[in-house]
Amino acid sequence: MVKQEQEQEFANRPDNTAFTQQRLPAWQPILSASIVIPGFVLIGLVFIGIGVALFVASRSIQMLEIDYTGVEQNSPCFKCSDPNVKTCMCRLDFSIDSLFKGPVFFYYGLSNYFQNYRKYGVSKDDNQLSGNLDYFKSPSDSCSPYEYDSKGKPIVPCGSIANSMFNDTFKLYQIVKGAKKLVPLDGKGIAWWTDYNIKYRNPSVKPLRDAFNGTVKPLFWSKPAYELDPSDPNNNGFINQDFLVWMRRAALPDFSKLYRRITEGDYAEGLPAGNYSLEIAYNYPVLSFDGRKKVVFSNVSWMGGKNEFLGIAYLVIGSMCVVMSIVMLIVYAKFKFPDEE
């Protein structure tokens, strides 16, 4: 019995190798002033260099923001901010002093809008949005209270996110010798590739309209999902570019979402200096939650969009490393140990 227990004990013992018995050679750096201080200086200089490059690139980006909420009485959109006005058009006139280099990105912006609120964020049916027809007739409970209308018909797409989809529309004109020249706005490919090709799918039913039989559009929408883009049949349903952009929730309460790109025709190189007019179909209410609306025209650089914070952060961290290295050098010079001399 004792012999069996000893054999069992030896059987569970790890092999007598350098790896299993932890006899592998190890190396542990011994940090000294001659290593740490130059290391801090090097890291600081690298961070400062990156920070300067990021800051200069960000400052070179052109950006034009125009608020059109219409709260102020002198605002061109003041009449449209009245919640009792259902269909309203307003116009923003602005000018550009120099060439606004292309490609120009056209965004709409909202403020005080918390898309990151958890109950709002889960208010959708992923099975429905992936084209599963079973969930067209019986939406998920997570869509409540936007899963059925007052007559008990299922809402497709259901949920708070889809129901609150941004629906202001814009047309941009350049004023040339007193006449309006339409600036072409490109709405293709503005959504994430993964959203368009993987996450959201239309039902395989043809025509798409038939897949929505027995359902109703979201309460806030003016038209059903299969008619979101009458000019392009391939841009309807759950793979509509504007719908996909909206369903990609923002992390912060003040955000901008891509609406269109200006890359075609006479404006491929950007927006020439001159006068412009932006016609807005004002539909989206924001005053009920003290929100604001704006349009943003911007271009990009190698670092992306305008973001001075990133460059400043690198500069601050780099400067702190350099300062700390100087402090450590002073302390080392004054209090170094005798055996280091």
Image (spheres, grey):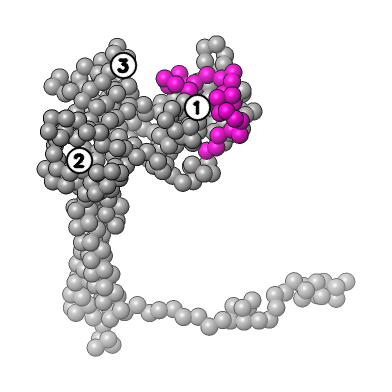
User: In what quadrant of the picture does the C terminus appear?
Assistant: bottom left
Circle 3 sits on which residue? 87
Circle 1 sits on which residue? 226
Of helix, strand and loop, which one carries label 1? helix
Circle 2 sits on which residue? 64
Secondary structure mostly seen in magenta is loop
Cβ–Cβ under 8 Å for marks 3 and 2: no
**Residue 224 x %, y %:** 48, 23
In this view of the protein, can residue 70 be seen by the observer? no
Question: Was residue 61 drawn as part of the magenta stretch in this picture?
Answer: no
**Residue 317 x %, y %:** 25, 61
User: Considering only vertical position in the picture, is 201 above or below 334?
Assistant: above
Comparing labels 3 and 1, the label whose residue is closer to the camera? 1
Q: With 78 as the anchor, is 215 left or right in this view?
A: right
Front-most of 78 and 337? Answer: 78
Front-most of 212 and 83? Answer: 212
Seen at 56% across and 20% down, the residue is 215
**Between discs 3 and 1, the one toward the N terminus:** 3
Identify the magenta region.
Answer: 200-225
Seen at 22% across and 77% down, the residue is 332
**Between discs 3 and 2, the one toward the N terminus:** 2
Residue 327 in which image quadrant: bottom left
Residue 64 in which image quadrant: top left
Q: Amino acid at mark 3?
A: Thr
User: In what quadrant of the picture does the N terminus appear?
Assistant: bottom right
